[in-house]
Each structure stands twice: as C-alpha cells, then as structure tokens.
Amino acid sequence: MPRKPKCRFIGSYPDHWCFSAEDSAQGEPIVLTLDEYEAVRLIDYEGLSQERCAEQMRVARTTVTSIYGSARRKLASMLVEGRMIRIAGGCCEISPSDNIQIAAKEENTMRIAVTYENGEIFQHFGHTEAFKIYDVEDGKIVSEQIVDTNGNGHGALAGFLKSAGVDALICGGIGMGAQNALAEAGIALYGGVSGNADAAARALAEDALIYDPDAHCDHHDHHHGEGGGCGRHGSGCGNHSCHN
C-alpha cells in the first residue's frame, strides 16, 4: 500500500483554476494539483531556486524536483495536445501567517466570516478589505471580531479564511474562481446576501439564513482587469468547461 504523501505548504489558492485553448481538444482535462501549481509559481513565476522552493513548501529538494517535473510535463501536454488543464486537489496546507491575529477556535465551535464594511455585508468578495468573524456554539454567537484581510485577490482571501479556521462565508457577489478556492478550502459558501452583517450571521447560526446558491459577481470596472474578473468572465472551471 503506497505511503500517504506528506502535506505540502502553499502560499495561497490560485485566482484562476481552468485554462484551455480556443480550439481545445476533446477528452478528459489534465489535472494540475495545487502543489504542482505552487512549484511552478515559485520557480518559474517568482524565480526561486528549487532549494528555496523546497523551504517554502516545507519538503525535501528531491520532492520539489519530482513535483516540478510532473507539473512541467502536464503543462507541455496542454500546449502540444491542446488539452484543457484545471487545478484541483493535492495534499496541501496554507502556510500559516503571522499577520492573522485571531484567537484559536474552540472545539465544537462553528466559525463564520462575513465580508464587511461599515456594519453591512460588502458585496464584492475579491475586493473586501475586512471580514467580521463570528464564533458560534449551540446556535448562538459567543464572540466576534473584525479583521483586516491584509491582501486581495480571490485565492489569497480564501487562503486567509482557511488559515483563520473559518467554516462558512457569508458574502454578496462572488466569482467562480473564488468559489473554487473556497471549495478546495472546505469552506461553506452563502452568497447573494445583503444587509446587516450581524443579522446575517445570527440567521446562519440559527440555520435560517436566506441566500442565493447561484450568486455571482456582476461588478465589472477598471479594478478587475488582470486581477481576474468575477462570475461569467472569471476563470473558474465547472463541469469540465471554462467560464470565459
């Protein structure tokens, strides 16, 4: 029986999860795991050596060589064969951040995050500058805290929530890329919600929140651009097809 691989640390989740050529070939997509994506990001995009990449991912240099080689072969197959490639899976954890000053979550506690601005639910997940965090026990909120996001971009925000021990997110509009990141992080999504943040958190704690499971982000302005659009113009992958 093969030994279970050691979890690798990644800096954040991707903003973009699915890629294909305009004349993409038929067949099953290639799956690039999160650790393979991270190795390519660190070595080819950030310009780190394999030694430094291994340090950041907290694995041996030989492991990075294997991960990186596998990723490059998959990327080559995509380019040569015209096959779709999507990012998913892998035994990975988000690197802990010293910037997250949130109390440890107690056992049997549900932690809810709400995109937050001036007491209301901020409507564009990828641009939120703060979350309000609520800890829930036995259907009641027992503590709450407002925290700065310390970053932006769908993948970075999803990683922030994962590191903070969040179980569920309440927000307004949210793009497909962010939805993919939250799913990988194991965070339940309650989108399409507006109004008072405290009231929404109480409603979810009481299992009475009204939300839109098909919520997406329609916010298209000059802030999106290279940062990754939301919703129908994002780069998420669903049902093995890209939403472009």
Image (cartoon, rainbow, N blue to C red):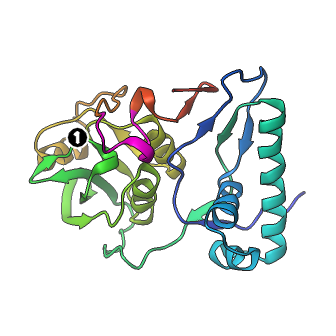
In-image side of 26 versus 129 (left or right): right
26 and 21: which one is in front?
21
Looking at the rendered structure, the kind of residue marked 1 is Gln
Where is residue 111? Give x, y as percent: 32, 57
Where is residue 143? Give x, y as percent: 19, 65
Q: Which residue is drawn at 36% across and 42% down?
A: 224
In-image side of 74 versus 180 (left or right): right
In-image side of 115 versus 15 (left or right): left
Above or below, 132 against 73 in this view is below
Residue 227: say if magenta: yes
**Residue 102 found in image quarter:** bottom left
Magenta residues, dominant SS class? loop
Count the marks: how many? 1
- Which stretch did the figure color magenta? 220-230
Residue 116: say if magenta: no
Residue position marked by numbered label 1 in the rendering: 123
Above or below, 232 against 68 in this view is above
Q: Which residue is drawn at 78% across and 68% down?
A: 64
